[in-house]
Amino acid sequence: MVDERECRKRIKDDPLVERLFLGEGPVYHESNWPLVDATGAILGHGEIAVAALWDGKQVRGFVSADSLLGHAPITAPLQELLVLFSSSIGHLVALQLAQEEARTTAEFHRRVLQGLQAAVVVHAADTRIVMSNQMAADLLGVGEEEMAGKRAPDPAWDFVDEDGTPMVQRDYPVNAVLRTRNRVTDLLVGIKHHGPDQTVWVVVNAFPLLSPDSTVEKVVVTFTDVSARRRMEEERRELETQILQAQKLESLGALAGGIAHDFNNLLVGILGNADLALDLLPADHRGQTHLAKIKEAATHASDLANQMLAYSGKGRFIVEPVSINAVVDDMAMLLRSSVAKNVSLAFDLADDLPLVDADELQIRQLIMNLITNASDAIGKAAGAVTVRTTVADVSDGGDKGVPPATEIPPGACVSVTVVDDGCGMDETTKRRLFEPFFTTQSAGRGLGMAAVLGIVRGHHAAIQVESKPGVGTTVTVLLPVSACPPSSVSVYQTSAPGTAEPVARGGTVLVIDDERSMHFVASELLRKHGFVPLMAANGKEGIELFNKHAEEIVTVFLDLTMPDMNGHRVFDELRRRDPAVRVILCSGYSEREASRDFSDSCLAGFLKKPFKGKDFVAKLS
């Protein structure tokens, strides 16, 4: 066989081939032709015939036959047989080349498909898979050799919509293209494998391949794995939600703290005047009962204000090493009386529980609020609440609580868990659990769990909530283990117990406060106990009065928050004029919050608003 392209180059050098091309027949015959060997040496003369390897379209080469060995004549039938043979060989060569080209093309397509960074599946019109790549097999959870012949709906996988509901088969991408003859673009689909409960999320594009008569021959479906991207987006959305929730709770905390502070200032007038009136009236006077009720209601209002302060993180806070077990043991009887009669209360306290750095009164409030909330969740049916303490080891990554902004650093901690078998909570209720004034109880105020959150934050602790409707709720508070010796941590410097000198009666007491109710109550109490009251409505007026009466003033009651000139500035100015001035700070905020910037300033004391008359007078000695 000779390649046609080479033959054409050598036509002039090969007279037989040249004569074949110049002739009119499919074969050229010569009766006396020099016959040569491979080296070109003439071996003899005889007949020779040459025919082209014709494949029906082009010449693929040539076939020759001679009579050198047989000496038989090459007759016309033999020449026709040579033409038939050469034509058959030509068609076989063309077929072989076409098959080789098809294999090369198929290998090229396979390499392209396997190299794509996307899964590709080609469906026939009956949805059978006729072509696919390895990535498609991996995402669909089967071997590549198993893909061929499978249809769109297959027992090996299910498709789900973006909202997680099963996808209707008519909406499968291949079926949608076959039904509408339109492209499917950027469709988010979940692939669920039959086995592990895991969904692979992909973005699908599909388009039809049309035949000359515009019918759909095949459908090409491509899909890209976006599971990691979807998880990142979900995490980003969750983080944004947590940030917004934290900002919301922070804003509510600031609002609650401000309201509680102003509320406590108003209660000064109510409680103070009630105390004064009770002292003025005879013990058997009818008004005693009504005034006592007013005082009781005002005290309850003060408790609510303190709950709001606890939520805002500005409540009472004196840190000292505390034994959680000792607190629970001491509260046991009170806790049992606080739950409903249909609720049984059990304690499971770990032995040798380490101490925590905490404010004991706030820890008591936290435990009481958690147990009261658990009892309320049980309702009227019989139920159980369990208080459990144990030592937990927080992992290196720290332990994030719920809601955000409650996180405990790695290390040992004390775990306080309250478990109930009540109604439980759905996710919506759980998300709003710590919002102030949110409650599911008709008689609730919605401040109990808000105060718990404030206490947890104030202690740099974490809180975790697990709940399921109809099953119950588990709330766990994680408190870092104390590294301090069992001694109290002072918020400000005061005289040692028993060494304070009583203030001489008859001295002048300056009260600097912008609340008129404070002026009236303080004036009455001071006069009653032999002091001369001096009232200032703001910081500037207070400094002027102090300058005029400095030698007579024995004590100054100073409000923290006042317009124009706050308590800090007034205190600095008073100390500048008289370093030995005796100043008692007054505020509706907690002692820790109010005296934060006075820690090294030697305050003489702190008076929390609202106050009882005896507490006010006690600060003078």
Image (cartoon, rainbow, N blue to C red):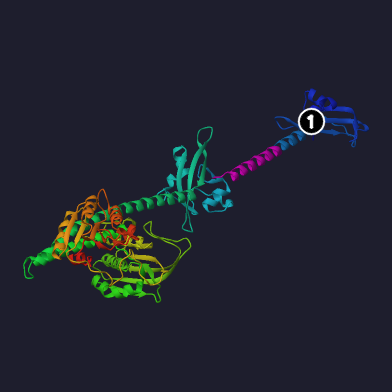
In the visual, does 459 lie left or right of 587?
right
Q: Quick one: 620 or 454, which is closer to the camera?
A: 620
The residue indicated by pointer 1 is 6
The residue furthest bottom is 351
* Image x and y of residue 71, in percent: 90, 34
Which three-letter amino acid code belongs to the residue tagged 1? Glu
* Image x and y of residue 135, in percent: 56, 49
In the visual, does 273 lie left or right of 163?
left
Q: Quick one: 181 or 376, which is closer to the camera?
A: 376
* Image x and y of residue 253, in percent: 30, 55
Q: How many tags in the picture?
A: 1
Question: In percent of the image, x 33 and y 71: which residue is there?
Answer: 387
Question: In percent of the image, x 32 and y 54: which residue is there?
Answer: 249
Q: Quick one: 327 or 7, which is closer to the camera?
A: 327
Residue 490 belongs to the span the image colors magenta:
no
Q: Residues within 10 Å of mark 1 (few under 14, many from 20)?
A: few
Report the span colored magenta.
95-118
